[in-house]
Image: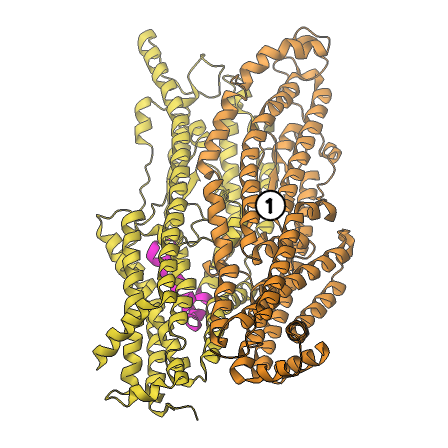
């Protein structure tokens, strides 16, 4: 009997024009989302490559100068010297021999590679660039946000697969199931069906299985197609593990909305009232609660304003300058190229400029740490409050799965800060020793390679969101299941 | 007759328990949003004013130094929030707040508050504007979808029609009844907004606040009317109340959630925003090779004779001004066209995207309203661009003043080995503090005329649909 109902419902669904157009709509939305998500990732890659190529070419030119100089020294004899200051082009040792100049005037761009599923959920990756410049400049400059995107576009947010799943999919679910029982009741067919050897629970389950089966099969298949179309690293197990998690999260989230439909149908009155209740629930859980939680987080733990941080950094800079630079020509501070050749002050200048940067870093560090601490407090408040809305849990989960979460970015920044120290130290030491950089040294500059977090860490962060959704789902299933026996089949 | 229909509709709605609930929740959310918005707004404005004063003081007290070093030390422009940001925060969370103005470099504003927020912030701001744009239409739909379809289902439509009421009278009466009920809820918001406004000493900004509020109210009323007549049209057209509800909720979700994102993605595809790395590399390479292919160093050598001739000198030694300052100012000016080209390219992509978004916006009434609301609240893209322009104009003037001063004051430093010129920090007072004056309301309005027209078109369309639907109103269920 159950099988008959399921196959009947499935056939009915496919015959209804509304359902077919819904399926077309969702396929279109996923295709569009995959395409636009991919564009966003491509743009990041293009930007990162251009920035890396630009800075590499500047270092490349400096290296070429040292090669010419080395050849000249070899040919003419003499000592391979350190350039204490910038010369007129062609005269004396080139700037490329000066580690201080190389380290201060060129940057190295570090990138956090996108995961195979990055285009599925853009998360914060559209405002936090995945490529950042490291040089001998203060730490603050690393995270100065350089994203150029039109603020209107950022405010509106990405049309990615996460958006389709979190916002649109529930609407489709509700549209095909809001009148599950109520319509049969209103038409008077419910009593007739139940005259057959089938319980109300079984009937309900069959109807849901038919709808959820068709819809989920469609969505997961489309997700797979999207993965093949726009996913990356299809050969790696990481990508497939992430896709498996994406499928599970989508499954649980979608089933939760079916369960909501059942819940409302069990308690609800007529179809129209069910519709209102479900639309209201959707609005509350997907729109209102997340914005309220965000409001709560930013009100309880407001991040210090970037404006305050800026003026504080400036205050530190002025103080440092007044202390250390008093005896020096500040003019040279800004214009290395004008430092006279062989002038010992040039040496002092770079030394002081370096100690200056250290002073700024030290002065700003506490403020900066406070910034990060406040953000972490916001984040942990959101972690705690996520359980009141499946949409928040789903968004956190999808960001985690796609590798666009705040935590992965922080993991990246941790490595960036460590590398910043290493890079700075490499050039500072050689500069202070007045060691002349040779062409071969250019191959020995510190190299950066992003170390991915262990998959277990990702799973552990993902667990609360996934478990929370599962608990909500079971709750939403259990309540109607228990009360279904008291359901009134005929309208009184 | 219309009045009594309206009265019946209104009292029926107000007596319904569902209305009390939804209206109560909506009013509560509105008040929360406005209170939070106001608190954030005043905190932002306090910090902005304080920071601007501080950075101005830092500029004046930066110590005795070479004036050009002073220009490198530079100054910051901090962006004020916009007169009605507490109601509609617009792009403020996603646009930079601090713009560094220094010698040799044009910068863009950095420090987007959104980067200092949990990722949940991307669900959006709970603001007065958000509630009126998204929740108010849904309230109208909930209150109005049964207006005709419900009466048909319960059989009262036939009775009403038999009493000689014309279809149009019925439409106007119902529109009036529902409209008043919605206004009752939204009125609280207007009142709360008014109180907040009178508490805040905003009039000092001289941004024609009264006119802004009036236009804002008019836009939202128009928007509400669009949804009201659409709801009545669908209610009259649909065979059952639940069909009406599904169609209306579907349209609402399309207009409020799908259309804005789709419009943005389409506009980005047609007019892509350059990627930061690419844009930066292009601009800096262009700077290094010179605007028209002559590197700045070479170009100055080429032009040196002409420049010296302007001072009646044929060599550096004869110059009555400091050559270093001349060179610095020239280098500065060589970069202007490069900045204009690359920043111009960026701005063109923004403006083209905006125009396209406005055009796509005709498909959904929420889009033109959103643009209007941001513009009237002073939290839109154009204001941000104006701010960046003002900062760049200030920067150029600051550098020019400082370099000119250096040219005359350090005129005796032209011989090699004469060291560098150090000025008393008092000279930095020659640069007046930065102050941002927004363009007037008039300019904003002329830029957004198209959005007003789009809203009006939507009103006409929804009215026409409603009139058409009630004309073919059938009293029977089929």
Image location of residue B42, percent across then percent down: 67, 59
Residue receiving disc 1: B98
Which quarter of the image is occupied by the N terminus of chain A?
bottom left
Identified at 22% across, 53% down, the residue is: A237
What residue span does the magenta drawing correspond to?
A380-404
* Relative to A186, A195 lies left or right: left
**Residue A399, magenta (yes or no):** yes
- Residue A306 to residue A298: above or below: above
| Chain under callout 1 | B
- Report the magenta stretch's main SS: helix
Image location of residue B230, percent across then percent down: 58, 66
* Relative to A420, B298 lies left or right: right
Residue with the most extreme bottom position:
A492
- Residue A396 to residue B292: above or below: below
Identified at 58% across, 12% down, the residue is: B301
Image location of residue A332, percent across then percent down: 56, 26
Work out whether residue B276 or residue B439 is closer to the camera in this orientation and state it: B439
- Residue B347 to residue B229: above or below: above
Work out whether residue B241 or residue B26 is closer to the camera in this orientation and state it: B241
Which quarter of the image is occupied by the C terminus of chain A?
bottom left
Image location of residue A153, percent across then percent down: 51, 49
**Residue B429, magenta (yes or no):** no
Work out whether residue A169 or residue A371 is closer to the camera in this orientation and state it: A169
Query: Does residue B386 appear in this view?
Result: yes
Instruction: Please identify the quarter of the rendering in which residue B417 is found.
Output: top right
- Among the chains, which one is yellow? A
Query: Does residue A339 appear in this view?
Result: no
Work out whether residue B69 or residue B437 is closer to the camera in this orientation and state it: B437
User: What shade does chain B have?
Assistant: orange
Q: Tell me the SS state at disc 1.
A: strand
């Amino acid at each position: 009997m159950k099988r008959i109902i399921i196959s009947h419902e499935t056939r009915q669904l496919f015959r209804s024009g509304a359902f077919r157009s819904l399926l077309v709509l969702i396929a279109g939305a996923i295709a569009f989302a995959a395409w636009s998500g991919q564009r966003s990732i491509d743009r990041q890659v293009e930007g990162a490559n251009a920035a890396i190529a630009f800075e590499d070419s500047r270092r490349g030119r400096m290296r070429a100068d040292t090669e010419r100089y080395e050849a000249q020294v070899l040919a003419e004899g003499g000592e391979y010297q350190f350039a204490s200051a910038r010369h007129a082009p062609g005269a004396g040792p080139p700037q490329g021999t000066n580690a201080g100049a190389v380290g201060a005037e060129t940057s190295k761009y570090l990138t956090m590679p996108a995961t195979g599923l990055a285009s599925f959920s853009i998360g914060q990756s559209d405002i936090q660039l995945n490529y950042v410049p490291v040089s001998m400049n203060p730490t603050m400059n690393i995270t100065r946000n350089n994203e150029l995107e039109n603020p209107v576009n950022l405010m509106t947010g990405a049309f990615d697969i996460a958006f389709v799943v979190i916002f649109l999919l529930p609407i489709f679910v509700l549209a095909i199931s809001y009148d599950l029982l109520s319509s049969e009741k209103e038409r008077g067919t419910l009593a007739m069906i139940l005259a057959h050897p089938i319980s109300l629970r079984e009937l309900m389950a069959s109807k849901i299985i038919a709808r959820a089966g068709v819809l989920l099969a469609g969505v997961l298949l489309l997700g797979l197609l999207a993965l093949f179309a726009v996913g990356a690293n299809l050969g790696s197990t990481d990508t497939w593990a992430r896709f498996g998690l994406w499928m599970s999260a989508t499954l649980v989230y979608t089933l939760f909305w079916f369960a909501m439909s059942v819940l409302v149908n069990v308690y609800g009155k007529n179809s129209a009232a069910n519709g209102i209740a479900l639309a209201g629930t959707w609005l509350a859980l997907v729109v209102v609660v997340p914005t309220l939680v965000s409001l709560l987080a930013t009100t309880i733990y407001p991040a210090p304003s970037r404006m305050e941080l800026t003026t504080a950094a400036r205050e530190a800079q002025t103080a440092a300058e007044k202390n250390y630079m008093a005896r020096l020509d500040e003019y040279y501070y800004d214009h290395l190229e004008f430092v006279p050749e062989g002038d010992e002050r040039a040496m002092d200048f770079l030394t002081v400029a370096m100690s200056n940067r250290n002073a700024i870093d030290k002065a700003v560090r506490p403020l900066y740490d406070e910034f990060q601490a406040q953000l972490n407090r916001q984040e942990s408040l959101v972690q705690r409050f996520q359980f009141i809305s499946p949409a928040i849990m789903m968004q956190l989960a999808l960001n985690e799965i796609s590798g666009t979460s705040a935590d992965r970015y922080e993991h990246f920044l941790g490595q960036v800060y460590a590398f910043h120290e290493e890079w700075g130290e490499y050039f500072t030491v050689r500069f202070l020793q007045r060691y002349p950089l040779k062409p071969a040294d250019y191959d020995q500059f510190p190299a950066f390679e992003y170390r991915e977090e262990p998959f277990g860490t990702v799973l552990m962060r993902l667990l609360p969101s996934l478990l929370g959704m599962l608990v909500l789902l079971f709750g939403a299933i259990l309540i109607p299941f228990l009360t279904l026996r008291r359901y009134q089949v005929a309208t009184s | 007759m219309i009045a009594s229909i309206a009265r019946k509709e209104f009292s029926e709605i107000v007596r319904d328990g569902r209305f009390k609930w939804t209206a109560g929740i909506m009013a509560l959310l509105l008040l929360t949003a406005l209170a939070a918005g106001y608190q954030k707004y005043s905190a932002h404005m306090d910090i902005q004013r304080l920071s601007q004063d501080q950075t101005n003081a830092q500029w004046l007290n930066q110590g005795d130094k070479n004036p050009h070093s002073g220009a490198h030390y530079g100054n910051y422009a901090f962006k004020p929030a916009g007169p009605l940001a507490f109601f509609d925060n617009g792009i403020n969370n996603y646009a930079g707040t601090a713009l560094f103005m220094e010698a040799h470099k044009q910068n863009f504003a950095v420090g987007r508050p959104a980067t200092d927020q949990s990722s949940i912030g991307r669900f959006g701001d709970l603001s007065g504007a958000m509630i009126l744009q998204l929740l108010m239409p849904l309230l109208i739909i909930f209150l109005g979808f049964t207006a005709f379809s419900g009466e048909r289902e319960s059989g009262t439509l036939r009775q009403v029609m038999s009493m000689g009421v014309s279809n149009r009278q019925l439409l106007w009466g119902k529109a009036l009844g529902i409209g008043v009920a919605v206004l009752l809820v939204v009125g609280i918001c207007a009142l709360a907004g008014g109180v907040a406004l009178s508490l805040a000493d905003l009039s000092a900004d001289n941004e024609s606040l009264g006119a802004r509020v009036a236009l804002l109210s008019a836009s939202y009323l128009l928007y509400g009317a669009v949804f009201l007549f659409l709801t009545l049209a669908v209610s009259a057209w649909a065979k059952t109340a639940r069909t009406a509800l599904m169609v209306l909720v579907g349209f609402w979700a399309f207009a409020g959630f799908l259309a804005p994102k789709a419009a943005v993605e389409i506009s980005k595809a047609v007019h892509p925003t350059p990627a930061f790395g690419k844009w930066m590399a292009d601009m800096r390479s262009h700077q290094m090779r010179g605007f028209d292919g002559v590197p700045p160093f070479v170009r100055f050598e080429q032009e040196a004779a002409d420049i010296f001739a302007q001072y009646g000198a044929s060599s550096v030694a004869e110059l009555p001004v400091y050559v270093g300052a001349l060179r610095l100012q020239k280098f500065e000016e060589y970069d202007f066209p490069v900045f204009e080209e690359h920043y111009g390219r960026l701005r063109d992509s923004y403006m083209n995207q905006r125009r396209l978004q406005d055009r796509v916006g005709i498909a959904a009434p929420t889009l033109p309203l959103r643009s209007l609301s941001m513009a009237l609240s002073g939290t839109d893209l154009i204001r941000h661009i104006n701010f960046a322009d003002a900062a760049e104009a200030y920067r150029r003037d600051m550098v020019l003043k400082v370099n000119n001063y250096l040219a005359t004051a350090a005129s005796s430093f032209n011989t090699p080995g004469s060291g560098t010129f150090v000025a008393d920090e008092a000279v930095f007072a020659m640069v007046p503090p930065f102050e941002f004056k927004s363009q007037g309301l008039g300019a904003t309005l002329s830029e957004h005329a198209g959005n007003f027209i789009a809203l009006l078109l939507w009103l006409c369309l929804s009215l026409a649909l409603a009139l058409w639907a009630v004309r073919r109103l059938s009293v029977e269920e089929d």
